[in-house]
Amino acid sequence: MARRNHDTGPSGVTVDQLTDALFPVIDELLGQLEGDEFTTTEFIDLILSVKPAAIAYHEALARWGEQERPSKMVLHGQVIPAALRRSRRVEWQGYAHGEADAYAVPAWWKLVTPAAQSEQ
């Protein structure tokens, strides 16, 4: 069995490629949010409740190429957080200790005001 990089799925797709694919969907959802803070888990629930975003999520799971649990661990723990970090619409606030997620350690994210976005 050949060794592969930890950030490359069995299908040959990388975490960065999945992040690139999901980023437009994630950034668009962020632009529609109201409020102040949310957790990664809450955001994933939102992704799954919006049909185009849910389709993109499930396509990314399939593209990773492993069974459901390890694929979700990659999406929840690496891909979605990487896309959130890439966005100018949110800032990472720290780990969400005590927040349940069977696939990753969720974090708190704070929405950035449009004025603060333009300063970045």
Image (cartoon, rainbow, N blue to C red):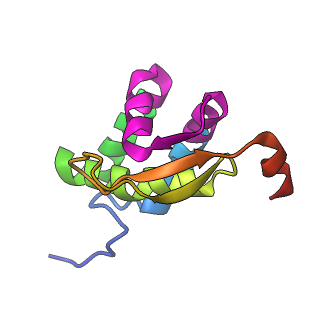
Residue extending farthest left:
1
In the image, taking residue 108 as reference, residue 10 lies left or right, namely: left
Residue in the image at 44% along x and 29% along y: 46
Q: How many marks?
A: 0
Would residue 55 be found to the left or right of residue 72 on screen? right
Q: Residue at 27% x, 51% y: name it.
A: 98
Question: Is residue 36 located in the magenta-colored stretch of the structure?
Answer: yes
Taking the spot 36% from the left edge, 52% from the top edge, the residue there is 106
Along the line of sight, the residue nearer the viewer: 47 or 112? 112
Using the image, determine if residue 83 lies above or below residue 51: below
Q: Which residues are magenta?
A: 25-53
Name which residue lies at 53% across and 57% down: 93
Q: Is residue 115 above or below residue 53?
A: below
State the residue in front, 2 or 83: 83
Query: At which x and y percent is residue 92?
Result: 54, 57
Does 29 sit above or below residue 93?
A: above
Identify the image quadrant of the N terminus.
Answer: bottom left
Quarter of the figure that contains the C terminus:
bottom right
Q: Would you identify the image quadrant in which residue 115 lies?
A: top right
- Decide whether the magenta segment is chiefly helix, strand or loop: helix
Between 68 and 29, the residue placed more toward the observer is: 29
Residue 98, can we see it?
yes
Query: Residue 53: where, in percent of width, then height?
Result: 47, 30
Residue 60 appears left or right of 93: left
Position of residue 12 measured from the top left corner of the image (x, y, whole percent): 36, 62
On whether residue 69 falls in the magenta region, the answer is: no
> Is residue 18 at all visible to an observer of this figure?
no
